Image: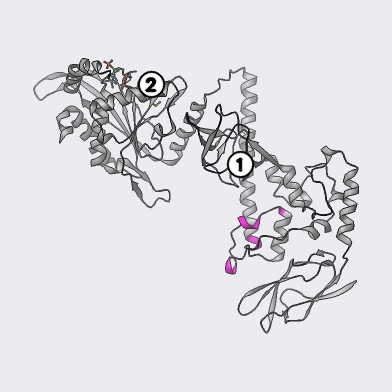
Amino acid sequence: MNTIVSFPDLGTEEATVLEVGFAQGDWIRENQIIVVLESAKATIDVPATKEGQVQEVLIRVGQVVHSGEPILKLETMAHATGELVVALQEISATLSPDQLIVKTDVAKPLPDSAQIEEKALDQVISLPDLGTDTATVSNLLVQEGDSISKDQPVVVLESSKASMEVPAPRAGIVRQWLIHPGQTVQSGDPMFRVVLPGLAATALLPNDSKPLTSPISESMQPRSVPDSVYMPSKAGVHAGPAVRRLARELGVDLEKVVGHGPHQRILKEDLKSWVKHQLSAATAVEELSSDQERQEKAMHAEGATLLPLTRIQVISAQRLAQSVHHVVPVTQFEQADITELEAFRQQEKAAAQEKGVSLTVLAFVMKALEKMLRQYPRFNSEFKLDGRGIYLRPERNIGFAVDTEQGLMVPVLKNIQDQSLLDLASRIAELSRLARDASLKPDQMSGASFTVSSLGSVGGTAFTPVINWPQVAILGLSRASIQPIWDGKAFQPRLMLPLSLTYDHRVIDGALAARFLVDLSRQLGDIRRMLL
Ligand code: CAO
C-alpha cells in the first residue's frame, strides 16, 4: 500500500533541509530520524511516522520546506518484517548449532548487523586463578575503548594477603568491563570483553569490505533487515540520519564520539577522525603482537632459554617502565660522614639487641629523612597530571626497597614523625621479614610519599635509583667505607656513606636537590642536629 509521508508541524514558518537520511528503495522504520532541518532558531530531527520501503524521495538537501509538505512516497508492508523473521528462522533451522551465533525469535526483534558481529568478535576474558578464595576489585587500570597488550596489568585486586595486579592474557581493545571497583570476585569470574587485535580493525571497516567472521552467510543479513529492526541510537546523541547510518555501518557507538558541529552535533568528519584514531590504536596493538611473535621465533631458532618472571617481577618491570615514561629524572650524589653515627650505633647495638631490635644505619637515615621531608615539602609531593601544579602531601610515609626471592618489594613506614629510632629499626626489620615471607598486607605496601633504596649491606659505591612514580624523589644508599678526608691540616680516616638522590626535575630544581642532600649529609654527620 502506497502512502505519502509529510512533514509534521515544524513549529516554524519554514526550514531548510540539512540532511536526507534515506534513498529510494531503503527500508525505514517508525520513529527513525529521516530528515534534519535547520530553521532560524534550531536544527530539527524529523522522524518517520510509518514503517515501509521508500518508493520516491520528494525533497533534496538545501530545499526550503514547510509544515505538511510531502517528504517521501512509502510502500507500507505491515507483515513484511514478520515474514522475513520466519524466513530467517527456517534458514537457521538448517544450520548446525556451532554455525549459529544468533538465534532469531519472532517475539523478539532481530538483532542488527552490528550486534551479530559484536557477538562474533568479542571474547570474554575471565579472572585467572587468584590463589585465594575471594578478592576485592580495587582499581581498573584501563578504560573501555583502550588498547591493551598481552600481559599488561588491567586490574588491581586486594585479598586478605596481598594486593595483586592481574595481567591481560591477550592483546586487544577493551570493549566492556564486567567487574567494578569494590566488587568481590573469585577465580574464573568474567572480567571484561575484549575485541581481538586482528578483528578490532575489521570491526571498524565498512560492511562491504569486512570479511565475514561468523559462519552466518550474507543471505541471512539482507540489507533491509538490519534497517528494519535497527535499535534507535541513544537519545542523548546529537547526529543526523546520514551520520547515524554511517556509524551503524562502521559499528561505531556514537556516544563515544565527540561532536564539533552546532550544539555538539556529530559530523561525518568527527566520525571519520574517531574511526581513524581507533584504527591506528588497533594497528599499534597488532604491531606489538607481531613484534612479540617475531621475537619468540628468533629466540626459539637461537635456542635461547625462557626464564619466566615472577608475578612481583612482572609488576616491578611495569612500574619501572612507568617511571621512565612519567618523570624527568636527575641523580645528585653526596657522601655523609657517619663516623660518629656509627660509633654511637655500635655503642647502642647490644642494648637494642637485648630488646630484640637490630639497630642499622637505615633507621638513622629514616629518622633524618622525616625532618628533611618536613623542611623540604617538595620532596614529599606528587606532580599534578595536567602539569599545572604539585600536590604537597601532608603525611610523610617512607617506602623502602627489600630484596626478596620473589623480586623487589617496597613496604612502607607510616607516620614516622611519631616513632623513635628503635621503633623505626624494629618496624624496618619486621616489614622486611614480612616482605621476604610474602606476607605483607596491601596497606603495608601502599601510601608511600618517598622511597629509600639501600644497597649498603650488599656493596657498591654509588647507583642511580629509579623514582617510584607518582612520587618525585628516591634516596639511594651505598656501602659506607673508610675514606681519607682532609680536615684542613691532615687526612683523617672517616666512615663515609655514599648517598644518591634521584629527583623529578619538573618538580625539584638542581640547586634545591643539592641543598637537600648536603643538609641530609650534615644531619647524618652530626646526629644531634636531628633534635633541632
Ligand atoms: N654501609 C655499611 N653497612 C651497612 C649499610 C651501609 N650503607 N647498610 C647496612 N649496613 C649493614 C647493617 O648496618 C648491618 O650491619 P650490622 O650487622 O653490623 O648491624 C648489615 O649491613 C645488614 O643490614 P640489613 O640488610 O640486615 O639491614 P638494613 O636495615 O641495612 O637494610 C633492607 C634492610 C631491607 C633495606 C635490606 O636488607 C635490603 O633488602 N637491601 C636491598 C634493597 C635493594 O635491593 N635495593 C635495590 C633496589 S633497586 O633494584
Which residue is outermost to the left?
489
Quadrant of the frame with the C terminus: top left
- Residue in the foreground of this view, choosing between 354 and 203: 354
Among the two numbered marks 1 and 2 on one chain, the one whose residue lies closer to the N terminus: 1
Magenta residues, start to end: 250-269
Tell me the tag on residue 433.
2
Near mark 1 (Cα within 10 A), the count class, few <14, some 14-19 or many ≥20, is some
Quadrant of the frame with the N terminus: bottom right
* Image coordinates for residue 460, horizontal then vertical, percent: 33, 20
At 12% across and 24% down in the image, what residue appears?
A: 487
Q: What residue is disc 1 on?
A: 284
Say left or right for 525 vs 380: left
At 53% across and 43% down in the image, what residue appears?
A: 181
Element on which disc 2 rests:
helix
Indicate the amino acid at tag 2.
Answer: Arg
* Image coordinates for residue 167, horizontal then vertical, percent: 56, 33
At 55% across and 20% down in the image, what residue appears?
A: 307
Indicate the amino acid at tag 1.
Answer: Ala
Say left or right for 316 vs 82: left
Is residue 169 on the magenta stretch?
no
* Image coordinates for residue 349, horizontal then vertical, percent: 22, 17
Which of the 4 image quarters holds residue 414? top left
* View quadrant of ligand 1: top left
Which of the 4 image quarters holds residue 468? top left
